[in-house]
Every structure is written in C-alpha cells, then in structure tokens.
Amino acid sequence: MSVTVYEPDVLVANGVVTPRGRLAVDAAGRVVATPPGAAAIRLEGKALLPGLVNAHSHAFQRVIRGRAEHLARGKSADDFWSWRETMYAAATALDPDGVELASRQAFVEMALAGVTAVGEFHYVHHQSDGTPYSDVHELARRVVKAARDVGLRIRLLRVAYARAGFQVAANPRQRRFLDPDAATALERTASLRRALQGDGLVSVGLAPHSVRAVPREWLEAFGASKEEVVHLHVAEQPAEIAACLTEHGRRPVELLADTGLLKRGTTLVHAIHLEDRERSLVGRSGAGVCACPTTEANLGDGVVAADALLAEGVPLSLGSDSHATIGLLEEARRLEEHLRLVRGRRAVLDPGDGEPHGLSARLFDFASRGGARALGLPGGSLAVGDPADFFTVALPPGLTAPLEAAVFGHAAVRDVAVEGRFLVRDGVHPLAAPTAIAFSQLVSRLQP
Amino acid sequence: MSVTVYEPDVLVANGVVTPRGRLAVDAAGRVVATPPGAAAIRLEGKALLPGLVNAHSHAFQRVIRGRAEHLARGKSADDFWSWRETMYAAATALDPDGVELASRQAFVEMALAGVTAVGEFHYVHHQSDGTPYSDVHELARRVVKAARDVGLRIRLLRVAYARAGFQVAANPRQRRFLDPDAATALERTASLRRALQGDGLVSVGLAPHSVRAVPREWLEAFGASKEEVVHLHVAEQPAEIAACLTEHGRRPVELLADTGLLKRGTTLVHAIHLEDRERSLVGRSGAGVCACPTTEANLGDGVVAADALLAEGVPLSLGSDSHATIGLLEEARRLEEHLRLVRGRRAVLDPGDGEPHGLSARLFDFASRGGARALGLPGGSLAVGDPADFFTVALPPGLTAPLEAAVFGHAAVRDVAVEGRFLVRDGVHPLAAPTAIAFSQLVSRLQP
C-alpha cells in the first residue's frame, strides 16, 4: 500500500509539537504510523498542523459583508434585529445558482484560511414564495456541491424552522425556511442524508433553528429522535431569553434540558446570555458550545464566557458564522481577546499548566479538534487512524513555536489537504480567481 | 511642470467618492488640479484612497508578538504589568542593529497594509546600562532610517521618561529610557529635530511617557515649552489612575489640564478609564485621543468610549501600538466592534447622517485624516495641495463602495505611495522578503 510521508520543519500531531516530525498518509487518506526508512517529502519553512474545523457557517451570508454596516436612513440605532432584515433580503433574492456561488466563495476563503471541514447551518430551503423546489433538497445539494467542489469535508446541518416566534406574526421573508411540522423536518433530514450518501466527506445533522423559531413540541420530537448531531442557536440576544421566559416560563437552556435536547452530540451556538446555573446544566449534560467571536462582535451580541464554560467542563468549538471575517485562527484569537477586554486581564483562557504554549494550544484545539467533536466528524488531531486533514503555515527559519505562530503570529497559510489530497498549494486554490470574479458580479447585481 | 494623473475605478479624495475620478500629482509629490485633457494612468480594478496614518507605534515591540501570550510559570493571572516585563526584556536585549531591523520589519508590514505615515513613540534611547550612546540620538536615527528606507513619512515622538513611578523603586530595565531632567529632555528633543532636518518626510515631537513616568514639574516644563506636537499615554490601566490620585489628588486628565498640556496639538493615547468630566475637559481643550483597539484587547486594557468622546467633539486617531496586529483598517473596524460588544448594538459610531457609507467613512477618516491631524502632518484627505500620500485596494468589478470594502470588506491593499512615489506595487515591497528573513533570525536569537 502506498504511503506518503511529509516532513515539515515542525509537526503538530496528536497534541505534540515535534521539530522535523513526520506525518505518514496512506492511499485512503488516513494517518498511519511512519514506515521505517521511508523517504519523506520535506516541507521546508513550514509547520504542519491539524486542519481547522469551522463548526458554524451560514455560507450565503458572505454576500452581505460590508453592506449592513451603517444606520438605516431615519433610524437612530441598529442592532441584531435590523441587521437580520438585510440578511433576509439577501436570503430572499438568491436563486439556486446564487446560493451555490456565494457558498463556493465562502468555502474557498475558508480553505485558503486552513479550514478542512465545515458545519453548514443551512436554512434557506424553498423557493421565494415558500413552495419547495421539485427536488426538496435542491439548495442543500447546491451548498454541498460547493463545499465538495472546493474540497472541504462538510456536515450539512439541516435547519428546522417553524415560525417567526412566539405570538409573533408570520414574516414573509422567512417563507423559504419553513417546514410544516416536526415530523416532516425529521423526515426531510433523513431523506437528505439518504440523498447525499456515497460521498464519505459529506454528512447530515439536524439544526432546530432556535427556541424562538420552533415550538416546544418540535423540540420534544427532536429530543426523542435518533439524530446524533444537533446544533441550535441559543441565547445570542437578550430578547430571545425574554421571549422564552414569556412562552415557557424558563430560560432557553432549561427548556432544552426539559425537552431532551441537552445532551452529548448537541452544540449550542453562541450561548452568550446564560446564567451560572445554565452553564452548570450544559456542563453536566455533555453538550458543547460553539462561539463565533467576530460575528458576535459585528452583531453586538456580547462575549461568550468561555472561561466560565470551561470551568463547567463544556467543550468549545468555533465558527465564522456570518462571514464578516473568515478565519478560524482569528476566531480563536478573538475569543481570548474579547474576554481580555471585559475581564481586564490577559491569558484568560490559559489552562494554567505552566506550558509556554498552553494558551495557544488550547485556542488551537477549539479551532480544530473542538470543531470536529462538535460536528461529530473524525479527526482534528492527526492521530494514527485519523483522516489526513491538515494545513501548513509559513514558519520563519529558527522559530519552533507553530501554535503561537498560527494563533497569535498571523502566520500565512500555505497548503491545505483533506484526506491527504491538496486543495490549496502554496497559498493558491484553483477555484479562487474564477469564483471571486463571478461572486463580485453576483454581489453587484444584489446591490440595492 | 510634469504632472502624473491616475484614474482608478473609484477615487476617494477630499471626502468625496468619485467613480473614475482622477488624481493629479505634480513632480514635487503634491496633489494638484487635474489639467484639462491630460492622459491618465488607469488603475483598473482598484480604488484609490488617502494613505493611512498610524498615530501610535512602538516599532521594536514587533519582536515580542506571540511570545507573551500565556501565563508565566507559577502565575495564576497575567495582565498589562506582567506583559510589560516581557516587553522590557526585549527592550533590554536589542542593540542598535536590532532596533533598526525590528523597526524595518514593523514599517514594511505597515506599508503593505496601506500606511503612509507613522508616529513612532520612541523610548529606547540609551545603552543597556543607561549610558547614552556616543551619539545620544543613535537609536532614534536608526528608527528614522528604517522608516525612510521603507519609504514612510515619520513623526519621531521622542519620549521623556523620568522614573518608574510615584514612590516606586527604580527598575533597572527602564535605564535605557531615562533623561536626567525635563530641561535635558526638551533639549534632546530640539537637538534631535535639528539633527534630522533636511528630510521633509521626517519630523519630531515630544512624548512625555505618562503621568506615571514623569513628575508634575516635568509636565509643567513641557506645558510651558514651544513643542507643538505632544503625545502621552493616558488612562490605559486603572492602576495608573489610582497612582495619579494618590500622588496628585486628581485624575490624569485633570493633571494635564493643570500643567498646561491639555490643548490643541496634544494627543492622549488610549484614554480608556476616563470619567465624564474628563471627557468634557478633553473636548473643550482641542486635544485628541488615539485609540489602539487591537493592543487594548491584547493587553486587557478595555474599550475606548469613542462614542462618548465624539459627543464631546474630541478628534480621534488610531494606532497599532504593540503590533500584535499591524493594520490600521483592522484598528478602525475593531474600534467599532469593541463598542458593539459592550453596548449591545450595531453601528455605534455611525454619524447618523443617513448616508449608507457614513460609518465606514467616519472610521476611515480616523485612520487617515485623524492620524495626520494627531501627528501634525499635512494631508490625510488628498485635497489639492496635500502631499500625494495614497494607497489602492483591489475592488471587484461592479462594486462602487470603496470605504466599506476597505474598512469592512477586507479588501487587499495593492499599491502604496508617499509624495507620489510608490513604496508598494501590486502587493510587493522590495524590502519585505529580505527583511522578513533577517527579522526571523533576530527573533530566533532573542528566544529565551
């Protein structure tokens, strides 16, 4: 069986940093033990690290970058909810080709930033009037195609969306998102999974949008289902908490616990406005939290209390979410930096193990292994048996601290491989240039 | 007289955005009225904007990027003051060649990010034991040489540093910073100005380090001096405020007002921990504030209340300070984003003029004209008569919103010119590659 061996200046694998370490990859794209005496391909001036996993993406939102960064005429304030109107306008305007193209642009940028796998929280399902496409999975297929054309591993998290909110009038701009009932949402998730089987790099999960957008019966149905990977938006904005208390008499995390959804395999996206007892509930449940710091800053959501969550044993992952920025290493850095701003001290998330690379290693882990865990995907650490999903960064001669270089040093991403197959080589992705041109034409057409 | 005319896809000059606008530059590097019928050099796919002005830089601190991002062994917390020990170790270790090389690396990165002018807050003056070099201005000259080799305009803000603090024992690691008395500090500032005259792109200002590092008599002497451009660190950390209250019975901004330093021409760097009445004092005085958001996040300093400062009419500028990141456009975006995090809403700094590019234009202005104003430098807006200090960004076809693309769109910087002379062309600075190699060797030698 043919094995390829790489020898970078520094290898980060299985949590260990090894100068001139070797990574062996078999023909199936798995990490294997390095055969004795094997010739290695030298990756000079590069560090090789486990691929980054983007646990929360809305790929199509890439089209509104820079277009919602101002006060609307006649308004005196802007917030998450007014931003959402711009986002809904984009969601309404995109046809299947537009969804695929916007997704391809976002995924190319992810690949160029070292991402090897993405969790796409996908909620635009139907035609603009709400009628399903002749293939009910048309748009999900387009998003998956975009990811696979780029070369990424993808977990399509199919969103279940029931309503505008508790006692909130239907919003016509949400028509493309809706399923008629929980059973249909579950059935469509299962049928999508069947439709996409055959490509080992594609998988499907369930994403009840939020406790705002689905009623209690849906949450109960999902909690009783066999779905193993479940993602939800939770506690991103204070108004959601207030609405949940009004409707259910309890806070969102408590509602999830009551309905059987707070468990291992579930990831709470954002989880910003939590009380201490909610964080304890999450910690005891085995559920994880996905922070999206650059989006949370852009939307004025607030800071994920990652320190308090870690104290409760909650596993963390990261997402680029709205794609105001695309870079998991920036998300990792910003998670720590936002906490520094509000705590008034440094190295807030340092594990305190006395290791000079302890903080960088932990932040990197959120961006790699943490994401793989959240998406129920293999790997994230380049252990023997893992898929060979990795990336390299330029490491100047003489430096041997790849995790600091990656997380805090703004090191340039050079190569990216999924199952040992390179999507990016020396900073170039073959789809980047043609996609950028077509994408700019799309954005230009969407301008008001 | 020969005039060169540029015609980008979009020109931003004098606060106006003009598709296919023309910028005419005379042989002396000044913006002039476009001669009728002149042939133009097309800058296709690019927007041309006023050069960015980095109002607060400690260039040599580039060497510690990524090296102080963890808890020291045996410590349970890290903060500004423990970070400072790492920074002092670097300041102690660098010889003149090292200072010049580290500065060149920082300045090359600035140029690549669209910066055309820098305010270098320069405090490492002497040999490691505190003895002045045979040329007392040796290190200032090295920093200026680095900036001029790269091609940047520079205001060297020569720091006056008297002591470790009020009733604080002398710190041997500060020996390289000290002047014996205020008169000598002023005399050295004046003699440095004389020594550097002849290069119109170089100027000198005075930088009393902080109210911690200089006593009241020094502040009074500086307030009574003829120095027109004065920068100080103010209210970066709560501990400084407490020490100032103990020593002087008043807060830092009040002390500056009492000593004649709070006036037009003065820039307060950080100004984070201010009370409302201090912001009013600053507003009435004509002094400005320089925010350094990425450093303020890295160091856990807190968020500059730019909204409250603007309400008092305080002019704002931006700096990359410790160079944890180098990018004035990122500083502009982060100023707004940090406010969104703590205010819980969006478009916090939007001027409310109903313009769809109002917020981007304002943030861009802080990064360009605001910096020029803070440094007492000409230009910042490409008006007729200004120096032709500009940069271009890639602007995809069909897009006509260059300020949004620059501030929020992560547009790639392509060309950078100072007085009409290009330092960067299509993303390349000729010194970038050789400097990066030498710099990495320097950092490698400095590793503990």
Image (cartoon, coloured by chain):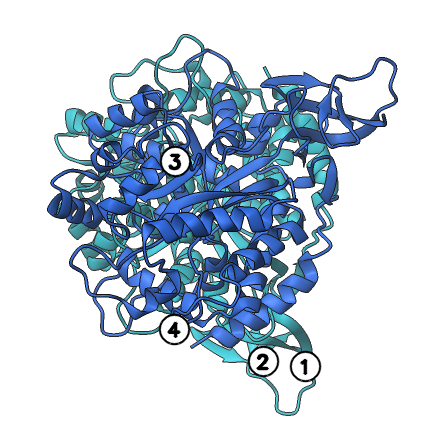
Chain colours: A cyan, B blue
Find the distance from the CA under tag 4 to the CA under tag 1.
49 Å
Foreground label between 3 and 2: 3
Query: Residue A407 location in percent, x, y?
Result: 46, 59
Three-letter amino acid code at disc 4? Asp
Instruction: Determine whether the residue tagged by mark 1 lies in a helix, strand or loop.
Output: loop
Three-letter amino acid code at disc 1? Ala
Residue A22 has which mark? 2
Dot 4 and dot 1 within a common chain: no
Query: Residue B145 location in percent, x, y?
Result: 62, 55
| Whether label 1 touches label 2, CB < 8 Å | yes
Find the distance from the CA under tag 4 to the CA under tag 3.
31 Å
Question: Label 1, on which residue?
Answer: A40
Q: Residue at x 44, y 58 (%)?
A: A372
Q: Residue at x 38, y 53 (%)?
A: B184
Foreground label between 3 and 1: 3
Is residue A292 in view? Answer: no
Question: Label 4, on which residue?
Answer: B129
Furthest-top residue in view? Answer: A74
Foreground label between 4 and 3: 4
Q: Residue at x 30, y 47 (%)?
A: B210
Q: Is residue A287 above or below residue A301?
A: below
Dot 1 and dot 2 within a common chain: yes
Residue B267 has which mark? 3
| Whether label 2 touches label 4, CB < 8 Å | no
